[in-house]
Image (tube, grey):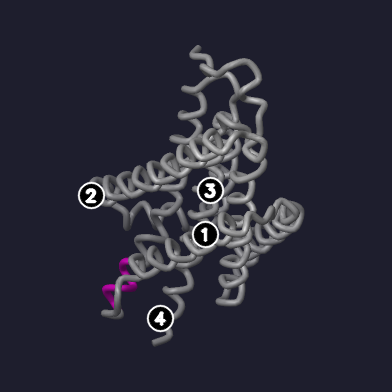
Amino acid sequence: MTQLQQPAGYGDVIAAQASDETRADFIRKTYLHLAGAIICFIGIELIIFQTVDVAGLTRSMIGGWMWLIVLGLFMVVSWIARSWADSTTSVPMQYTGLGLYVVAQAVIFVPLLYLASELSVRTGGSSIIGTAAIGTLLTFGALTGFVMLTGKDFSFLGGILCIGGIAALVVIVASIIIGFSLGIVFTVLMIALACGYILYDTSNVMHHYRIGQHVAASLALFASVALLFWYAIRLVMYLQSEE
Protein backbone atom coordinates (compact mmCIF):
# COMPACT_ATOMS: atom_id res chain seq x y z
CA MET A 1 0.00 0.00 0.00
CA THR A 2 1.55 3.30 -1.10
CA GLN A 3 2.17 5.80 1.69
CA LEU A 4 1.78 9.54 1.34
CA GLN A 5 5.23 10.95 0.66
CA GLN A 6 5.20 13.96 3.01
CA PRO A 7 7.61 15.40 5.56
CA ALA A 8 6.81 14.67 9.20
CA GLY A 9 3.78 16.67 10.32
CA TYR A 10 3.14 18.01 6.82
CA GLY A 11 -0.30 16.39 6.65
CA ASP A 12 -1.29 18.01 9.95
CA VAL A 13 -0.93 21.53 8.59
CA ILE A 14 -4.26 23.05 7.62
CA ALA A 15 -4.48 25.29 4.57
CA ALA A 16 -4.97 28.50 6.57
CA GLN A 17 -1.73 27.89 8.51
CA ALA A 18 0.43 26.85 5.56
CA SER A 19 2.85 29.11 3.75
CA ASP A 20 1.48 31.06 0.80
CA GLU A 21 3.34 28.82 -1.66
CA THR A 22 2.17 25.58 -0.05
CA ARG A 23 -1.41 26.81 0.25
CA ALA A 24 -1.48 27.95 -3.38
CA ASP A 25 -0.15 24.54 -4.49
CA PHE A 26 -2.84 22.76 -2.46
CA ILE A 27 -5.60 24.93 -3.97
CA ARG A 28 -4.22 24.40 -7.48
CA LYS A 29 -4.16 20.62 -7.01
CA THR A 30 -7.70 20.65 -5.61
CA TYR A 31 -9.19 22.49 -8.58
CA LEU A 32 -7.18 20.50 -11.11
CA HIS A 33 -8.62 17.33 -9.59
CA LEU A 34 -12.10 18.89 -9.67
CA ALA A 35 -11.65 19.68 -13.36
CA GLY A 36 -10.45 16.13 -13.96
CA ALA A 37 -13.49 14.72 -12.15
CA ILE A 38 -15.83 16.83 -14.29
CA ILE A 39 -14.09 15.74 -17.49
CA CYS A 40 -14.32 12.09 -16.42
CA PHE A 41 -18.01 12.56 -15.60
CA ILE A 42 -18.66 13.93 -19.10
CA GLY A 43 -16.66 11.12 -20.67
CA ILE A 44 -18.57 8.43 -18.75
CA GLU A 45 -21.89 9.96 -19.75
CA LEU A 46 -20.86 10.01 -23.42
CA ILE A 47 -19.86 6.34 -23.22
CA ILE A 48 -23.14 5.38 -21.51
CA PHE A 49 -25.29 7.26 -24.01
CA GLN A 50 -23.42 5.73 -26.94
CA THR A 51 -23.34 2.13 -25.73
CA VAL A 52 -26.39 1.62 -23.51
CA ASP A 53 -30.14 1.67 -24.12
CA VAL A 54 -30.63 4.78 -21.98
CA ALA A 55 -34.39 4.83 -22.58
CA GLY A 56 -34.71 1.34 -21.14
CA LEU A 57 -32.23 2.11 -18.36
CA THR A 58 -34.21 5.20 -17.44
CA ARG A 59 -37.46 3.25 -17.23
CA SER A 60 -35.85 0.59 -15.06
CA MET A 61 -34.25 3.12 -12.71
CA ILE A 62 -37.23 5.40 -12.06
CA GLY A 63 -40.12 2.96 -12.30
CA GLY A 64 -42.14 2.53 -9.09
CA TRP A 65 -40.05 2.06 -5.97
CA MET A 66 -36.90 1.46 -7.99
CA TRP A 67 -35.80 5.11 -7.77
CA LEU A 68 -35.88 4.90 -3.96
CA ILE A 69 -33.63 1.84 -4.12
CA VAL A 70 -31.30 3.63 -6.55
CA LEU A 71 -31.06 6.63 -4.23
CA GLY A 72 -30.34 4.35 -1.29
CA LEU A 73 -27.56 2.57 -3.16
CA PHE A 74 -26.15 5.91 -4.29
CA MET A 75 -26.00 7.15 -0.69
CA VAL A 76 -24.17 3.99 0.42
CA VAL A 77 -21.68 4.21 -2.45
CA SER A 78 -21.18 7.94 -1.77
CA TRP A 79 -20.38 7.25 1.89
CA ILE A 80 -17.85 4.58 0.93
CA ALA A 81 -16.28 6.82 -1.73
CA ARG A 82 -15.93 9.75 0.68
CA SER A 83 -14.39 7.49 3.32
CA TRP A 84 -11.81 6.22 0.84
CA ALA A 85 -11.05 9.72 -0.46
CA ASP A 86 -10.44 10.87 3.13
CA SER A 87 -7.79 8.17 3.63
CA THR A 88 -4.68 9.60 5.28
CA THR A 89 -2.41 6.66 4.46
CA SER A 90 -3.18 5.45 0.95
CA VAL A 91 -3.00 7.61 -2.16
CA PRO A 92 -4.50 4.86 -4.39
CA MET A 93 -7.42 4.58 -1.96
CA GLN A 94 -8.04 8.33 -2.22
CA TYR A 95 -8.18 8.20 -6.01
CA THR A 96 -10.32 5.06 -5.95
CA GLY A 97 -12.81 6.90 -3.75
CA LEU A 98 -12.92 9.90 -6.08
CA GLY A 99 -13.27 7.66 -9.14
CA LEU A 100 -16.04 5.61 -7.53
CA TYR A 101 -17.96 8.75 -6.66
CA VAL A 102 -17.67 10.14 -10.19
CA VAL A 103 -18.97 6.87 -11.65
CA ALA A 104 -21.87 6.81 -9.17
CA GLN A 105 -22.83 10.36 -10.07
CA ALA A 106 -22.63 9.57 -13.78
CA VAL A 107 -24.97 6.60 -13.39
CA ILE A 108 -27.56 8.39 -11.28
CA PHE A 109 -27.58 11.34 -13.71
CA VAL A 110 -28.54 9.13 -16.69
CA PRO A 111 -32.36 9.32 -16.28
CA LEU A 112 -32.33 13.09 -15.76
CA LEU A 113 -30.04 13.74 -18.73
CA TYR A 114 -32.13 11.45 -20.93
CA LEU A 115 -35.40 13.15 -19.96
CA ALA A 116 -33.84 16.59 -20.43
CA SER A 117 -32.54 15.74 -23.89
CA GLU A 118 -35.92 14.29 -24.91
CA LEU A 119 -37.73 17.42 -23.71
CA SER A 120 -35.34 19.63 -25.67
CA VAL A 121 -36.18 17.68 -28.82
CA ARG A 122 -39.94 17.76 -28.21
CA THR A 123 -40.12 21.47 -27.45
CA GLY A 124 -37.62 22.48 -30.11
CA GLY A 125 -36.03 24.88 -27.65
CA SER A 126 -32.44 25.40 -26.67
CA SER A 127 -30.44 22.57 -25.16
CA ILE A 128 -31.59 22.11 -21.58
CA ILE A 129 -28.37 20.36 -20.60
CA GLY A 130 -26.18 23.01 -22.23
CA THR A 131 -28.12 25.87 -20.63
CA ALA A 132 -27.97 24.22 -17.20
CA ALA A 133 -24.25 23.49 -17.59
CA ILE A 134 -23.45 27.11 -18.43
CA GLY A 135 -25.57 28.35 -15.53
CA THR A 136 -23.87 25.90 -13.17
CA LEU A 137 -20.36 26.90 -14.23
CA LEU A 138 -21.13 30.63 -14.01
CA THR A 139 -22.70 30.27 -10.58
CA PHE A 140 -19.86 28.08 -9.31
CA GLY A 141 -17.29 30.53 -10.67
CA ALA A 142 -19.02 33.52 -9.07
CA LEU A 143 -19.34 31.85 -5.67
CA THR A 144 -15.76 30.55 -5.78
CA GLY A 145 -14.44 33.97 -6.74
CA PHE A 146 -16.41 35.60 -3.91
CA VAL A 147 -14.93 33.28 -1.28
CA MET A 148 -11.39 33.59 -2.60
CA LEU A 149 -11.51 37.37 -2.95
CA THR A 150 -13.10 38.04 0.44
CA GLY A 151 -11.37 35.22 2.32
CA LYS A 152 -14.56 34.75 4.35
CA ASP A 153 -14.93 31.53 6.32
CA PHE A 154 -18.32 29.93 5.71
CA SER A 155 -17.75 26.93 7.97
CA PHE A 156 -20.60 28.21 10.17
CA LEU A 157 -22.97 27.02 7.44
CA GLY A 158 -22.16 23.37 8.20
CA GLY A 159 -25.00 22.78 10.67
CA ILE A 160 -27.53 24.69 8.59
CA LEU A 161 -26.62 22.76 5.45
CA CYS A 162 -26.81 19.46 7.30
CA ILE A 163 -30.33 20.21 8.52
CA GLY A 164 -31.32 21.44 5.06
CA GLY A 165 -29.92 18.32 3.42
CA ILE A 166 -31.76 16.01 5.79
CA ALA A 167 -35.02 17.92 5.31
CA ALA A 168 -34.61 17.75 1.53
CA LEU A 169 -33.95 14.00 1.67
CA VAL A 170 -37.09 13.46 3.77
CA VAL A 171 -39.17 15.42 1.26
CA ILE A 172 -37.70 13.49 -1.69
CA VAL A 173 -38.35 10.12 -0.04
CA ALA A 174 -41.88 11.20 0.90
CA SER A 175 -42.54 12.30 -2.68
CA ILE A 176 -41.52 8.85 -3.95
CA ILE A 177 -43.58 6.97 -1.36
CA ILE A 178 -46.69 9.16 -1.45
CA GLY A 179 -46.42 10.10 -5.11
CA PHE A 180 -46.57 13.90 -5.04
CA SER A 181 -44.56 16.07 -7.43
CA LEU A 182 -41.64 18.24 -6.35
CA GLY A 183 -42.39 21.62 -7.90
CA ILE A 184 -40.35 24.60 -8.91
CA VAL A 185 -40.22 26.00 -5.37
CA PHE A 186 -38.44 22.89 -4.12
CA THR A 187 -36.07 23.06 -7.08
CA VAL A 188 -35.16 26.69 -6.34
CA LEU A 189 -34.63 25.86 -2.67
CA MET A 190 -32.32 23.00 -3.65
CA ILE A 191 -30.33 25.33 -5.90
CA ALA A 192 -29.95 27.66 -2.91
CA LEU A 193 -28.81 24.68 -0.81
CA ALA A 194 -26.26 23.70 -3.47
CA CYS A 195 -24.93 27.27 -3.54
CA GLY A 196 -24.58 27.13 0.24
CA TYR A 197 -22.59 23.91 -0.08
CA ILE A 198 -20.29 25.53 -2.66
CA LEU A 199 -19.61 28.45 -0.31
CA TYR A 200 -19.02 26.03 2.57
CA ASP A 201 -16.75 23.65 0.64
CA THR A 202 -14.77 26.44 -1.00
CA SER A 203 -14.10 28.13 2.33
CA ASN A 204 -13.03 24.76 3.76
CA VAL A 205 -10.51 24.46 0.93
CA MET A 206 -9.20 27.90 1.84
CA HIS A 207 -9.19 27.45 5.61
CA HIS A 208 -9.80 23.97 7.03
CA TYR A 209 -8.59 21.12 4.82
CA ARG A 210 -5.16 19.75 5.66
CA ILE A 211 -2.41 20.10 3.10
CA GLY A 212 -2.42 16.83 1.16
CA GLN A 213 -6.22 16.42 1.26
CA HIS A 214 -6.70 17.77 -2.26
CA VAL A 215 -8.43 14.58 -3.44
CA ALA A 216 -11.00 14.68 -0.64
CA ALA A 217 -11.46 18.43 -1.16
CA SER A 218 -12.05 17.98 -4.89
CA LEU A 219 -14.64 15.25 -4.17
CA ALA A 220 -16.55 17.59 -1.85
CA LEU A 221 -16.53 20.35 -4.46
CA PHE A 222 -17.57 17.94 -7.20
CA ALA A 223 -20.51 16.77 -5.06
CA SER A 224 -21.67 20.37 -4.63
CA VAL A 225 -21.30 21.13 -8.34
CA ALA A 226 -23.22 17.95 -9.23
CA LEU A 227 -26.04 18.91 -6.86
CA LEU A 228 -26.25 22.38 -8.41
CA PHE A 229 -26.15 20.93 -11.94
CA TRP A 230 -28.93 18.43 -11.12
CA TYR A 231 -31.35 21.09 -9.96
CA ALA A 232 -30.28 23.56 -12.64
CA ILE A 233 -31.37 20.95 -15.19
CA ARG A 234 -34.68 20.48 -13.36
CA LEU A 235 -35.27 24.25 -13.30
CA VAL A 236 -34.55 24.69 -17.01
CA MET A 237 -36.77 21.69 -17.78
CA TYR A 238 -39.61 23.22 -15.82
CA LEU A 239 -39.24 26.63 -17.47
CA GLN A 240 -38.95 25.17 -20.98
CA SER A 241 -41.98 22.92 -20.52
CA GLU A 242 -44.03 25.96 -19.50
CA GLU A 243 -43.24 27.87 -22.69
Q: In terms of depth relative to the viewer, which is nearer, 121 or 239?
A: 239
Mark 2 lies on a secondary structure that is helix
Instruction: Assess whether residue 118 is covered by the magenta stretch.
Output: yes
For the residue carrying disc 4, how many other residues have a C-alpha within 10 Å: few (<14), some (14-19), or many (20+)? few
Question: What kind of residue is marked 2?
Answer: Gln
Mark 3 lies on a secondary structure that is helix
Task: Name the residue that disc number 2 marks.
Answer: 50
Task: Name the residue that disc number 3 marks.
Answer: 221
The mark lying in front, picked from 1 and 3, is: 1
The mark lying in front, picked from 4 and 1, is: 1
Locate residue 59, reporting x and y percent.
40, 57
Q: Separation of disc 2 and disc 4 at Cα?
A: 26 Å
Please, is residue 46 above or below residue 219 in the view? Answer: below
Q: Quadrant of residue 84?
A: top right
Q: Is residue 103 visible?
A: no
Q: Separation of disc 1 and disc 3 at Cα?
A: 14 Å
For the residue carrying disc 1, how many other residues have a C-alpha within 10 Å: few (<14), some (14-19), or many (20+)? some
Mark 1 lies on a secondary structure that is helix
Quadrant location, the C terminus: bottom left
Task: Name the residue that disc number 4 marks.
Answer: 241
Residue range in magenta is: 117-122
